[in-house]
Amino acid sequence: MVHVDWRLRGAGVDLCNCAYGCPCQFNALPTHGTCEAAVGFHILEGHFGDVALDDLHVACTFAWPGPVHEGHGQCQAFIDERASEAQRQALLAILSGQEQEPTAFFAIFASTVETMHEPQFLPVEVRTDRVALTASIRVPGQIDGRAEPIRNPVDGSIHRARVVLPEGFEFSETDCASATFRTTGAIALQHSGSNAMLYDLHMGPNGIIRG
């Protein structure tokens, strides 16, 4: 049951091991059978009750041994070291899905995580540019990830593609790009030439805030 009014608005980027576009977005099985990802948010405006969350950065690493919906996943959260204790607890509560309807984004993903590793409070930087189709997730010594445009294999020109999900639970539309990322810590991953998605984050207790 949701007890706290909250909202996050900003920029999001997902880097995962699937092929461009990610079969998961089409209710299909992941490209390689497993799902591994680094996800980041730059919160431009946000609050959790009366705790302001403006201009904070958050990242997470994820790994599932099969499709996400089959569960048994693991996650590690990286919270902006600039966050106060109240802000840290607020962000962890949001990520846990405890303050969101069970059919909404954070709650859905939390329900598939079996192992939640100890969160880290470090310098986190998430940058996105949907026009240039570039993004980065940086956590020193933990996450080094970037997105760049998908290139035409013949002439090297930028290939633009967008996925539109009118009833999506993470975003309504996203720009597709090419991911390269390496993570250490509790979840060690390394992928290149895989799926990246850049989108606008606008989320609250009931899920996506549309319009």
Image (cartoon, helix red, strand yellow):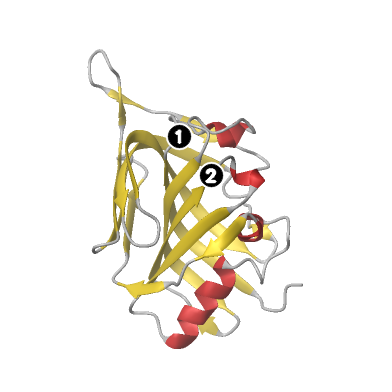
Tell how many labels. 2
What residue is pinned by disc 2? 65
Q: In the rendered image of this protein, does residue 91 appear above or below residue 128?
A: below
In this rendering, the label closer to the viewer, 1 or 2: 2
For label 2, count other residues whose C-alpha is less than 10 Å away and answer few (under 14), some (14-19) or many (20+): some
Going 61% across and 31% down the picture, which residue do you hit? 26
Q: Name the residue at 63% across, 66% down.
A: 97
Would residue 150 be visible to someone looking at this image?
yes
Q: Secondary structure at mark 2?
A: loop
On screen, residue 178 above or below 72: above
Q: Earlier in the sequence, mark 1 or mark 2?
A: 1
Between 170 and 36, the residue placed more toward the observer is: 36
Mark 1 Cα shell of 10 Å, populated few (<14), some (14-19), many (≥20): many
- Type of residue at label 1? Cys
Q: Is residue 49 above or below residue 142?
A: below
Q: Where's residue 173, x and y in %?
A: 54, 40
- The image's mark for residue 18 is 1
Amino acid marked by disc 2: Pro
Dividing the picture into quadrants, the one containing residue 17 is top left
Taking the spot 60% from the left edge, 81% from the top edge, the residue there is: 49
Side (left or right) of 142 relative to 166? left
Residue that lies at the very extreme toward the right in this rendered image = 1
User: What is the quadrant of the N terminus in the image?
Assistant: bottom right
Q: Are marks 1 and 2 in contact (CB under 8 Å)?
A: no
* Tag 1 secondary structure: loop
Q: Which mark is residue 35?
A: none
- At which x and y percent is residue 45? 47, 69
The x, y position of residue 157, in whole percent, is: 25, 22
Nearer to the camera, 64 or 9: 64
Residue sitting farthest toward the top: 154
